[in-house]
Every structure is written in structure tokens, then in C-alpha cells.
Amino acid sequence: MDLLQRITRDPAVMGGRPCLRGMRVTVGTIVGLLAAGRTHEEVLQAYPYLEADDIRAALSYAAWRTEEVELPLP
């Protein structure tokens, strides 16, 4: 399974922000926890319904988004 398929966006869930598998856990939450020094194991303990691939998916999505370039419309 492609990791990015785990990332969902639904206007009815967390205001349309990217979430993991339709749950109310955003990519930003996971990346923020890791940036704050939490380990993968600590994140999985805090969110026991997540899987290790969810963390990898969040990181993959965040990395992909940083490579996007927004161009102004003429």
C-alpha cells in the first residue's frame, strides 16, 4: 500500500486538514510531536489506534508538501 493513501482530507473532519485514515488525528499533530522530540513509540502509546505506517505516512506527506511549488495565477 502506498503510504500516501493513508492520508485523507474531508471537509467534515478537522476542517479538511490532512488526517490519518479518516481519523481526527492530523498530519500536523504527528509531525509536531516528532519535532518536539517524541519518539515513534511515544506517539503510538499516545494514539494506540495508530500504526507505525501512519507515522511514516505523515512524514512522507509532510516531506512531499514541502517540495510543492505554488505559482501565482496570471
Image (tube, rainbow, N blue to C red):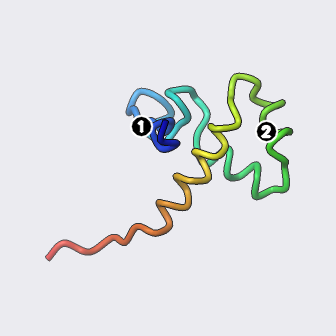
Residue occupying the far top of the picture: 49
Residue occupying the far left of the picture: 74
**Label 1 amino acid?**
Arg
**How far from the left and from the top, in percent, is residue 5?**
45, 38
69 up-or-down from 65: above or below: below
Q: Residue at x 51, y 34 (%)?
A: 14
For residue 62, which quarter of the picture? bottom right
Q: Secondary structure at mark 2?
A: helix
13 up-or-down from 64: above or below: above
Q: Secondary structure at mark 1?
A: loop
Residue occupying the far front of the picture: 1
> Alpha-carbon neighbours of circle 1 within 10 Å: few (<14), some, or many (≥20)?
some
For residue 15, which quarter of the picture? top left
Q: Residue at x 38, y 33 (%)?
A: 11
22 left or right, relative to 34 = left
16 up-or-down from 74: above or below: above
Residue assigned mark 2: 43
Q: Residue at x 18, y 72 (%)?
A: 73
Q: CA distance from mark 1 to mark 2?
A: 21 Å
- Viewport quadrant of the C terminus: bottom left
Asked whether 15 or 19 is in front, the reply is: 19
Q: Residue at x 76, y 49 (%)?
A: 33
Residue assigned mark 1: 9
**How far from the left and from the top, in percent, is residue 44?**
78, 33
**How far from the left and from the top, in percent, is residue 7?**
49, 39
Asked whether 22 or 60 is in front, the reply is: 60
> Alpha-carbon neighbours of circle 2 within 10 Å: few (<14), some, or many (≥20)?
some
**Label 2 amino acid?**
Val
**How far from the left and from the top, in percent, is residue 68?**
40, 67
72 up-or-down from 17: above or below: below
Circle nearer the N terminus (1, 2): 1
15 left or right, relative to 69 = right
